[in-house]
Image (cartoon, helix red, strand yellow):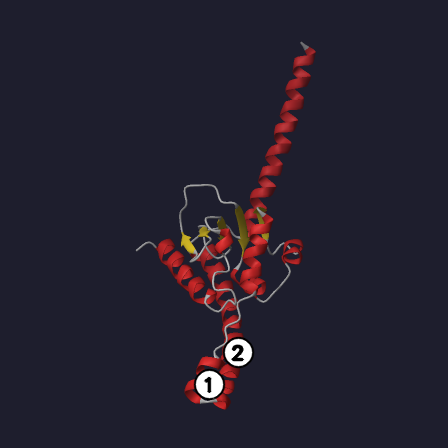
Amino acid sequence: MHLATLVAGSLEAALGHLLTYHPNPRPLADCRGQVVELKLAELPWPLFLILGHPVQVYSRYGGDPQATLSVSLSVLADIQQGAPLSELVQQNKLEISGDMQLVGKLAQVLTGIEPDITEPLSKIVGDGMAYRVQNLGQSLLAMGKKHLDATQAHLGDYLVEERRVSPAADEVARFCRQVDELEQRAQTLARRLAAMESCR
């Protein structure tokens, strides 16, 4: 199975599970058929979210998406925690193109997800134990986010250094300098040619 397809399927399953914790049983039903292109910094390919109930995720899509979202996994977690999109855009942590309202609706739905395991768990183990399990779960989630941030950094290094999927920052800077130098040489050559033409 292709890695992109596996990642898309995993994200689709995760979103489907998370959306069961949203207060609205069909939070994206009014966005049915709308497509958001998700460009994760950690992946060399985009993912396409076809909104509706359920959300479908593809690694390839033949049409034009209504919105494009360029972001990292850690910033997605910040969005889910309620971080304002405008601040993330100003901090260059998030790029949005296309239908801003659609992206805002998706962010609003993600923010509204509140997994509550204490109620069903209290029926099995009692209120006190359910409360302890919830606290433990929150601690584990915090630790998981810390490890996710570390994994994101390691994955970025791996894609840049080992797999050479994306260029390193110094390579990009060197390429930009070379383009600037080439532009200056082209301008100098154009001036010389213009001077030669005027001397005829």
Residue at the image point whose x is 57% and y is 64% from the top: 111
Q: Can residue 76 be seen in this view?
A: no
Quadrant (top left, top right, bottom left, bottom right) of the N terminus: bottom left
| Residue occupying the far top of the picture | 200
Under circle 1, the secondary element is helix
Residue 102 placement (x, y as % from top left): 56, 51
Q: Nearer the viewer, residue 73 or 118?
A: 118
Disc number placed over residue 37 in the picture, else none: none
Residue 8 placement (x, y as % from top left): 40, 56
Quadrant (top left, top right, bottom left, bottom right) of the C terminus: top right
Above or below — where is 29 with respect to 143?
above
Q: Name the residue under label 1.
A: 122
Residue at the image point whose x is 40% and y is 47% from the top: 60
Q: Which of 195 and 3 is in front in this view?
A: 3
Residue at the image point whose x is 42% and y is 54% from the top: 57
Q: Mark 2 points at which residue?
A: 138
What's the residue type where badge 1 is placed?
Ser
Residue 81 placement (x, y as % from top left): 58, 67
Above or below — where is 192 with respect to 5?
above
Q: Is residue 82 left or right of residue 29?
A: right
Above or below — where is 133 with respect to 154?
below
Under circle 2, the secondary element is helix
Q: In this view, does 163 lie to the left or right of 97?
A: left
Q: Which of marks 1 and 2 is nearer the N terminus?
A: 1
Residue 56 placement (x, y as % from top left): 41, 55
Residue depth check, mark 1 versus mark 2: number of the one nearer the observer = 1
Q: Distance between the residues labelled 1 and 2?
A: 16 Å
Q: Can residue 66 be seen in this view?
A: yes
